Image (cartoon, coloured by chain):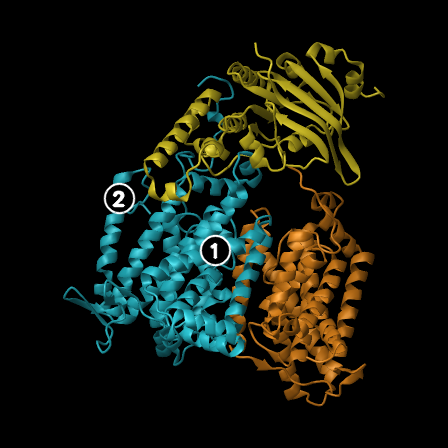
Chain colours: A yellow, B orange, C cyan
């Protein structure tokens, strides 16, 4: 079993005006892990996500993906390097069909431009066909293959979340970063999502996950990190986190 | 042009009018997050209405003193402009409050076109001359000249802006406007009727534009149905320069832009080795806009706002 | 529109036969219309140019969702470039150059030769068209670059500003060096000459063009050329729409942050939208200059930018057949009305109450307001995807919340 470090981040600080959103946050994820990021609201989880995926510029920090340093300066560069993400408030391309959404995910791994678009020579046609094929495969993989030609904003909430995951997978990422994929789901949907995540892990993908459902996270994740007020307060196996005093206080609050 | 001081005076005069119009843009943007593209045409309607009133006055009451006629003209233009602006909001913008932001902008462009067309139908295509009302004896200040019309213009601008500030800071409606601009939903929860606030905002902006329009006509002695477009656009640039949504910013931005234009037009020949002449004056506003939006989008007095993903 | 359907993915046979029907109609049209007088064909010639403009703007506004209010600037670039390189204007330019900067002027004359100093440059249409496309495309990227980080309404105002700046330059670049001949514009622009045939007709032929023994009025000849170009533009934009690039444009339009997160270099893709849209505008401008024989700054005002935008909005933002229809309607209708409504008003009222020019403006304004309020997707929007067979209901009950298919 190869122990390859997929994501290695250290020393991230981020300040917004008067607010220190992140203080010296780091993370180390091994290949094939499902790594969870939890913490009370406002702890800085999404901020950290936005930093590592290039939406915010950190004040300090080192960033390495699969051993190679990457610069989180622009989101599209991060995607090219191999981190794909979903969003807390689903960001699909509403007017496009489900299939087209996933096809956009293939953009970063394809290259036909104006010439190919206009002349549709053999290489362009082949690339387009392979994009379409791969997109359909991914839709089938996440379980919404039959909705390929449906306009994505008319999909059910749960299906939209799956679609966002399929689209992220289309970029062939080294790391799949999911921001609260289970938000707004009922128990049955969460179970199905959990199965999907395990399926993704079994394909060899590495997953970084923000979630609020602590119970689900304990059962699903290989390792967890807890943030509070922008600082990491605990890191380790689920059992360790569950019995960590600082974590319990953070969630329950000192006054309870 | 002439001396440095003359440029400053011209700049202040021009800037005051920009400021009055910029206030309209910035207030509407503050409450609705929308650029009222048709606002420049409200200035034009003000000027044309003023002209029509003055024509009647000159025919039926020619012996009234000039400044009284002017006051009546302004007094008549204000309600007309208010009605026009309120109608625009009601017809074009109200239904599109929750539409993607391009929709109201396109509608605004359509409204602007319609206003221009109606003005063309009513007042004709050609420039019309604005009657001379005040004396032409200019006052000398440090080697430069300022006409009574210009003095009146500056005074009126000052009075209007002061009045607006008092209204916004001290009255109930003003508080409601500021609350709605900051957070419409919470303001609603506090009992503020956002529709009333929006109508009031449009009405106030229109009143200021009416004053600016009539005085523009008086200052330049000529009006035409196309006269609102460029000043409106430049006033918007001024609002952005000062910090969109901020009324003090609009006033400051207007004055600064007026000065930039005036000084720029005066010295551009020297700066470019006579390659560009003062005809290029109109470009300054756009250049300023682009620089502001690139370098400091929040403007002089605006606050930096971070984006949340 | 059920009779004619152009959606090649849904029903290819119907789509192509619809296109064939339309093509045949378009090919015989000028000969039918010419029976009623050349002015009708001339109206359609101009309409074809506007359709090209609308299709170009559709790339920027419709596909990529960038509201460009200064699009007419690219039309101007193509037109004025043609004015400079296919007329005596270059000679005038050289003259003013010699007067102001003799060193530069004289060395240019030495390089270019006395013929150009006398007569100006007269490039053939085969060079003018690609040059116009390239120059306009370059301007597209230049004017688009500062707008890349701006939000919708600011982008609109800045592009509007650029459009105005271009017009101001065209109006004033006649001193000290006479590039554009100022408000008077450039005259005596060469008509188009293809395969040895002068589309304006040989001198003395009273604007009749003879092709292979077959003679037709000059406006008809231009009609076929513009029709060909229009079809080419339709073809190219359609191909662009259904491609990786087209998807990237729509992704940016729908959600720019998500597009970036999926690896799309939004800066480059947006610049491409500006450039491609602009290049079509440039080609249309070049054609316009040659067709009309002169260009002046009046033809490139904000009113024109708004007119083209109205065409895109009225027809169906982003939907190519819709945009063509919008262009045809708003370009031809005012002219048609002028021929009908003005005489009608004369008859009814004794004089013209509403001139055609006013009518034109009214139509544009009303089109934009009414469409945005009532049918924001346009008169002929893209047909919906297969979903929503039952109208407006949600598809919640057809979801798969669980893994079951």
Q: Mark 1 lies on which chain?
A: C
User: Residue C121: percent from the left, percent from the top?
Assistant: 37, 70
User: Residue C85: percent from the left, percent from the top?
Assistant: 39, 68
Q: Badge 1, how many Cα within 10 Å: few under 14, some, many 20+?
A: some
Q: Which quarter of the picture shows residue B242?
A: bottom right
Which of disc 1 and disc 2 is earlier in sequence? 2
Which numbered dot is residue B46?
Answer: none
The furthest residue to the left = C213
The answer, for residue C364, to whether it is visible in the render is no
Residue at the disc numbered 1: C138
Q: Is residue B230 above or below residue A218?
A: below
- Circle 2/circle 1 CB separation < 8 Å: no
Name the residue: 65% across, 61% down: B288
Q: Badge 2, how many Cα within 10 Å: few under 14, some, many 20+?
A: some
Q: In this view, does B96 lie to the left or right of B252?
A: left
Q: Distance between the residues labelled 2 and 1?
A: 35 Å
The furthest residue to the bottom = B63
Q: Nearer the viewer, residue C186 or A46?
A: C186
Q: Mark 2 lies on which chain?
A: C
Q: In this view, does C386 lie to the left or right of A154?
A: left
User: Residue A248: percent from the left, percent from the top?
Assistant: 78, 16
Which numbered dot is residue C16?
Answer: 2
Q: Which quarter of the picture shows residue B28?
A: bottom right
Q: Which of A44 and B133 is in front in this view?
A: A44
Q: In this view, does C172 lie above or below A210?
A: below
User: Residue C174: percent from the left, percent from the top?
Assistant: 51, 75
């Amino acid at each position: 079993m190869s122990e390859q470090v997929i994501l290695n981040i250290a020393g991230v600080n981020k300040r917004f005006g008067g607010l220190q959103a992140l203080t010296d946050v780091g993370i180390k994820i091994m290949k094939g892990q499902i790594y969870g990021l939890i913490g009370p609201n406002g702890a800085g989880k999404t901020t950290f996500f936005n930093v590592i995926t290039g939406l915010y510029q950190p004040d300090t920090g080192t960033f390495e993906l699969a051993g190679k340093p990457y610069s989180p300066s622009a989101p599209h560069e991060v995607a090219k390097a191999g981190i794909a993400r979903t969003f807390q408030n689903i960001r699909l391309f509403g007017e496009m069909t489900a299939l087209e959404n996933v096809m956009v995910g293939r953009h970063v791994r394809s290259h036909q431009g104006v010439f190919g678009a206009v002349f549709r020579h053999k290489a362009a046609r082949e690339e387009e066909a392979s994009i379409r094929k791969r997109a359909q495969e991914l839709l089938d993989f996440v379980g919404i293959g039959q909705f390929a030609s449906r306009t994505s904003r008319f999909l059910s909430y749960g299906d939209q979340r799956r679609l966002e995951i399929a689209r992220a997978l289309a970029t062939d990422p080294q790391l799949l970063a999911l921001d609260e994929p289970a938000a707004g789901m009922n128990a049955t949907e969460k179970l199905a999502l959990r199965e999907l995540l395990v399926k993704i892990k079994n394909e060899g993908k590495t997953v970084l996950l923000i979630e609020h459902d602590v119970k689900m996270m304990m059962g699903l994740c290989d390792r967890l990190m807890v943030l509070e007020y922008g600082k990491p307060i605990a890191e380790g196996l689920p059992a360790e986190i569950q019995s960590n005093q600082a974590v319990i206080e953070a969630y329950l609050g000192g006054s309870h | 042009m002439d001396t440095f001081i003359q440029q400053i005076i011209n700049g202040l005069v021009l800037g005051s009018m920009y400021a009055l119009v910029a206030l309209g843009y910035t207030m509407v943007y503050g409450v609705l997050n929308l650029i009222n593209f048709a606002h420049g045409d409200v200035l034009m309607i003000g000027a044309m209405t003023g002209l029509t009133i003055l024509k009647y006055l000159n025919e039926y009451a020619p012996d009234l003193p000039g400044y009284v006629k002017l006051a009546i003209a302004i007094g008549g233009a204000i309600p007309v402009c208010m009605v026009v602006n309120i109608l625009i909001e009601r017809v074009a913008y109200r239904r599109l409050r929750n539409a993607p932001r391009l929709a109201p902008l396109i509608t605004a462009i359509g409204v602007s076109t319609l206003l221009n067309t109606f003005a063309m139908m009513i007042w004709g295509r050609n420039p019309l001359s604005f009657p001379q009302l005040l004396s032409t004896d200019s006052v000398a200040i440090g080697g430069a000249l300022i006409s009574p019309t210009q003095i009146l213009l500056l005074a009126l601008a000052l009075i209007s802006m002061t009045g607006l500030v008092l209204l916004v800071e001290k009255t109930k409606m003003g508080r409601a406007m500021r609350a709605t601009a900051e957070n419409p939903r919470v303001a609603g929860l506090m009992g503020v009727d956002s529709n009333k606030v929006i109508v009031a905002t449009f009405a106030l902006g229109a009143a200021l534009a009416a004053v600016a329009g009539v005085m523009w006509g008086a200052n330049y002695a000529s009006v035409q149905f196309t006269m609102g477009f460029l000043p409106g656009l430049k006033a918007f640039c001024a609002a952005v320069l000062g910090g969109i949504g901020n009324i003090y910013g609009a006033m400051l931005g207007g004055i600064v832009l007026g000065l930039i234009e005036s000084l720029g037009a005066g010295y551009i020949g020297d700066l470019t080795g006579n390659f560009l002449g003062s005809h290029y004056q109109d470009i300054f506003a756009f250049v300023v806009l682009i620089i502001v939006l690139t370098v400091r989008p929040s403007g002089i007095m605006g606050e930096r706002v971070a984006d949340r993903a | 529109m059920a009779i004619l359907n152009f959606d090649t993915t849904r029903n290819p046979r119907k789509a192509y036969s619809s296109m064939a029907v339309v093509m045949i109609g378009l090919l015989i049209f000028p000969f039918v219309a010419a029976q009623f007088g050349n002015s009708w064909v001339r109206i359609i010639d101009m309409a074809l140019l506007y359709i090209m403009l609308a299709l170009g703007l559709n790339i920027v506004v419709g596909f990529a969702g960038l509201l460009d209010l200064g699009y007419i600037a690219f039309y101007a670039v193509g037109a004025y470039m043609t004015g400079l390189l296919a007329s005596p204007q270059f000679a005038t330019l050289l003259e003013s150059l010699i007067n102001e900067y003799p060193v530069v002027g004289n060395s240019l004359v030495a390089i270019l030769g006395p013929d150009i100093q006398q007569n100006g440059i007269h490039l053939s249409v085969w060079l003018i068209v690609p040059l116009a496309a390239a120059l306009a495309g370059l301007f597209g990227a230049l004017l688009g670059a500062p707008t890349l980080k701006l939000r919708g309404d600011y982008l609109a105002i800045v592009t509007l500003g650029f459009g105005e700046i271009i017009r101001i330059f065209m109006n004033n670049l006649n001193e000290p060096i006479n590039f554009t001949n100022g408000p008077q514009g450039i005259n005596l622009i060469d008509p188009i000459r293809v395969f040895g045939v002068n589309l304006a007709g040989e001198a003395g032929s009273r604007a009749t063009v003879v092709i292979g023994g077959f003679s037709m009025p000059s406006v008809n000849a231009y009609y076929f050329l513009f029709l060909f170009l229009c079809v080419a533009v339709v073809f190219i934009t359609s191909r662009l729409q259904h491609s990786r690039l087209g998807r990237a444009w729509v992704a940016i339009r729908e959600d720019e942050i998500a597009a970036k997160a999926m690896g799309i270099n939004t800066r480059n893709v947006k610049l491409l939208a500006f450039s491609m849209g602009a290049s079509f505008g440039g080609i249309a401008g070049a054609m316009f200059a040659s067709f009309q024989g002169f260009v002046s700054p009046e033809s490139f005002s904000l009113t024109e930018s708004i007119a083209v935008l109205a065409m895109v909005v009225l027809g169906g933002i982003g939907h190519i057949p819709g945009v063509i229809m919008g262009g045809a309607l708003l370009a031809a209708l005012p002219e048609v009305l002028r021929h009908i409504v003005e005489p009608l008003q004369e008859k009814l009222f004794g004089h013209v109450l509403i001139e055609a020019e006013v009518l034109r403006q009214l139509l544009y304004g009303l089109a934009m307001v009414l469409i945005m309020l009532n049918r924001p997707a346009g008169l002929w929007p893209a047909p919906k995807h297969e979903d929503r067979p039952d109208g407006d209901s949600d598809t919640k009950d057809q979801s798969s919340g669980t893994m079951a298919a």
